[in-house]
Image: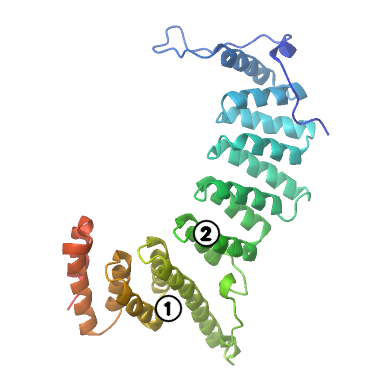
Amino acid sequence: MASLIETVSLEQFSDLTPVLQDDGPRPVVPINYDPNFRSIMDIFRAVLQNNELSARALALTSLVIDQNAANYTAWHFRRRCLRKLGSDLVAELRYVASIAGENPKNYQIWYHRRVIAQILRDSGEDCSGEGELAYTAAVLDEDSKNYHAWSHRQWVVKLFNCWDSELIFVESMLEKDIRNNSAWNQRWFCVHQGNRSDSYISASSKQSSTLSSSSSSSSSSSLQQLFDISKELEYAFSSTTLAPKNQAPWSYIEGLMREQQCQHQLSYSDFPQIRKHLESLEKVLGNSVPMYACWINVLTASNSEEDKKRAREICSQLETNLDVVRAKYWAHIGASILE
């Protein structure tokens, strides 16, 4: 295999005629480029023009990227050179990691890494994805809400089918910071896109289900679904107890219930543990806006006039006292609760 990272100087391209940047005859606001940047780009344009897929061209792309890591043309041309030369792609991942530290949210870098990881996987050199998961874990250790790192993990998890281990990772992230909304989003991703036959029981509280022993297969499926949602609610409840005013777990609960309502299957009334949890939490914390928002959902799902009356009272309390920033919203919700 060709050497991946080679030192290169512009003198090595003396056989080429630099292609100067053409801003037209009378540029309105000409950019005062650094002389070194200008020289590198003039040579790079000449290499592009000649379509030179060589070792020195590969090395030149590293100079261009060093000047501007967001240069997507340089990244694309680099990949063409890598394929042509049969370069060491594992070493290429190390190269990417070496420059990503200063550019952790650069889209071009993450996309390039994805392409290289895909090639390695397709060639059979990486069949587990452990390297990519370890890399993104290290990035998230520095910035636990790096969107690009989470997006890359989702791609890796789907490609290598490692759903169970990812759920364990997500729970470890939430143990570090229960308010990490990105980790909550990743949990939703694992639970709803895993497509696993064994369902999505919480890794931290996994138990043997006795609900699937029903003689009727349709009844068994329904009971298993009920069990699965209950386990997710249980996990979210434990988080609301730790941080009652944190919106993320409450949104997670609402998402689970809204999903069931859209599918015309289950509703808040099918999960009495939600009301029980709210009652216990309200005793120790009476001013959590997301808690009261959940209360409204629970009460309006009931057929009891008393419950609906209390839901309107909570809306009024939120409108006039607890959440005046969204006063009009709560007034609208209160008015929509019919007698």
Amino acid type indicated by mark 1? Gln
Instruction: Please provide percent x and percent y for residue 237.
Output: 43, 73
Which residue extends farthest front? 284
Secondary-structure class at tag 2: helix
Nearest to viewer (mark 2 / mark 1): 2
Between the C-alphas of marks 2 and 1, the distance is 35 Å
Residue positioned 65% across, 15% down in the render = 43
- Quadrant of the image for the C terminus? bottom left
- Where 140 sits versus 65, above or below? below
Q: Which mark is residue 265?
A: 1
Task: Say what secondary structure mark 1 lies in.
Answer: loop
Decide if residue 331 is on the left or right side of residue 232.
Answer: left
Image coordinates of residue 208 in percent, x first then y, are: 61, 82
238 and 330: which is toward the camera:
238
Please give the name of the residue rendered at 24% of the width and 85% of the height, measured from the top-left corner: 304
Based on the displayed image, in which of its 4 quarters is residue 205 positioned?
bottom right
Left-right relation of 307 to 219: left
Q: Can see residue 93?
A: yes
Residue at 55% across, 31% down: 70
Residue underneath mark 2: 176
Q: Is residue 267 above or below residue 66?
A: below
Three-letter code, disc 2: Lys
